Amino acid sequence: MERALSQKAAKAAETMVKLATVILSKVSPAKVSLDSLLSKEEMEIIPMIIKGPLVHFAAKFAAYEENAKEVIDSGGIVSPMVDDIKDVTKEIGEAKRQSVLAGQMLATLARSSQ
């Protein structure tokens, strides 16, 4: 009985590590992209209605990334992870749409200042 519980716990930890790895592989590139966009000088003149969600997603993705690393480092023991990868994927999609909008605005501003 005890051995079965131990195997079940090990399987759950392994599943959490796999989920954390997937989340890390999806969130890290999106976070880098957002950080790069937000670090541009021109972002200072972008309205908060566009920049705000980008800042929000960048902070959220940083938290996901940190949490995923903790789960992986602990071997799946620490697991206050997101339960559904679909939620993370949806947020990444929303962040990409906002990034495109901000990029278009930056391009328009660059053209108008020439």
Image (spheres, grey):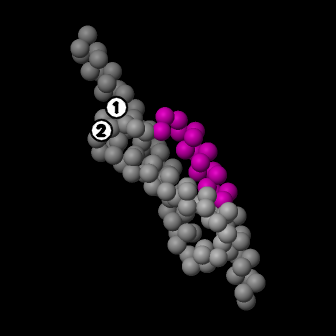
Q: Residue furthest front?
A: 48
Residue 2 percent across, percent down from the top left: 23, 14
Q: Which residues are magenta?
A: 82-98
Q: Secondary structure at mark 2?
A: loop
Q: Is residue 69 left or right of residue 27?
A: left
In magenta segment, residue 39: no
Give residue 53's quadrant in the image: bottom right
Quarter of the figure that contains the N terminus: top left
In magenta segment, residue 93: yes
Q: At x 40% / y 38%, what residue is drawn?
A: 80
Q: Amino acid at mark 2?
A: Gly
Q: Name the residue that disc number 2 marks.
A: 75
Vertical position of residue 57 compared to residue 79: above or below: below
Residue 22 percent across, percent down from the top left: 46, 43
Q: Are marks 1 and 2 in contact (CB under 8 Å)?
A: yes
User: Dot 2, how many residues are within 10 Å of its Cα: few (below 14), some (14-19), or many (20+)?
Assistant: some
User: Dot 1, how many residues are within 10 Å of its Cα: few (below 14), some (14-19), or many (20+)?
Assistant: many
Give residue 10's quadrant in the image: top left
**SS majority, magenta:** helix
Nearer the observer, 65 or 47: 47
The numbered dot on residue 13 is 1
Quarter of the figure that contains the C terminus: bottom right
Q: Amino acid at mark 1?
A: Ala
Vertical position of residue 114 compared to residue 59: above or below: below
Q: At x 61% / y 45%, what residue is drawn?
A: 90
Residue 41 percent across, percent down from the top left: 56, 79
Instruction: Say whether disc 1 or disc 2 marks the residue closer to the N-terminus.
Output: 1
Vertical position of residue 57 compared to residue 109: above or below: above
